Amino acid sequence: MSTKHLTHLEAIQKIKELSENAKICMFCTELETIPIHSRPMTLQETDKEGNLWFISSEASNKNFEIKDDRRVQLFFMNNGDAQYLSIYGKASVYKDKKTIQEKWSSMANAWFDGKDDPNVSIIRVEPRETYYWDTKVGKLVSMFSFVASAITGIKTNNADGVEGNAIV
């Protein structure tokens, strides 16, 4: 596996690609508590600055935990394309109508009584440290490489993979 560290625009593009491909992450709070508090969350979008946006209930534990400690860790996994992303960042909670209007998704109606529900809040995560794992050639070609290595007994060098920091 090769290493390629990305900065600014390349980093934002990679974060956007991998997070939006996976769509769901494990959203972790209270990072100093063992076990770490985590729950699955659906990403609404990754914006042009690399911020990640989520819809959440103001009454959820994660919202209370973010008020006490804004540090969060997000783990995205897209097994179908062998893409993985780890994001450590700072979360902010928004309750204003403008932000809710901009980030609202009709899918959130499964949890809320529309965007005017008083429990609706929006969480923005600003990445601080990000690491990614991706394939250069796609999962299928990588799988053939691993199978060939297993059959021939020749160790793979993982040359079809790439990993690195993505610094926004």
Image (cartoon, grey):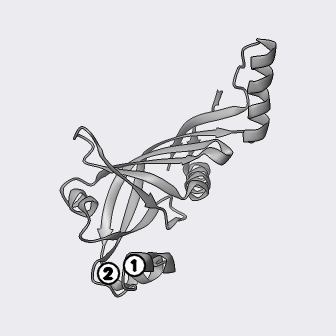
Q: Is residue 136 above or below residue 113?
A: above
**Which label is found at residue 96?**
2
Residue 20 visible somewhere in the drawing: yes
The image quadrant where one finds the N terminus is: top right
Q: Under tag 2, what secondary structure?
A: loop
Q: Is residue 46 above or below residue 155?
A: below
- Left or right, 94 with respect to 147, comes to left
Amino acid identity at mark 2: Asp
Q: Under tag 1, what secondary structure?
A: helix
Residue drawn at x 72%, y 26% as measured from the top left: 159
Residues under numbered marks 2 and 1 in contact, where contact means CB atoms less than 8 Å apart: yes
Q: Position of residue 89 (x, y in %)?
A: 37, 50
Residue where numbered disc 1 is placed = 99
Q: Is residue 130 above or below residue 107?
A: above
Q: Position of residue 163 (x, y in %)?
A: 60, 35
Amino acid identity at mark 1: Thr
In front of the other: 94 or 154: 154
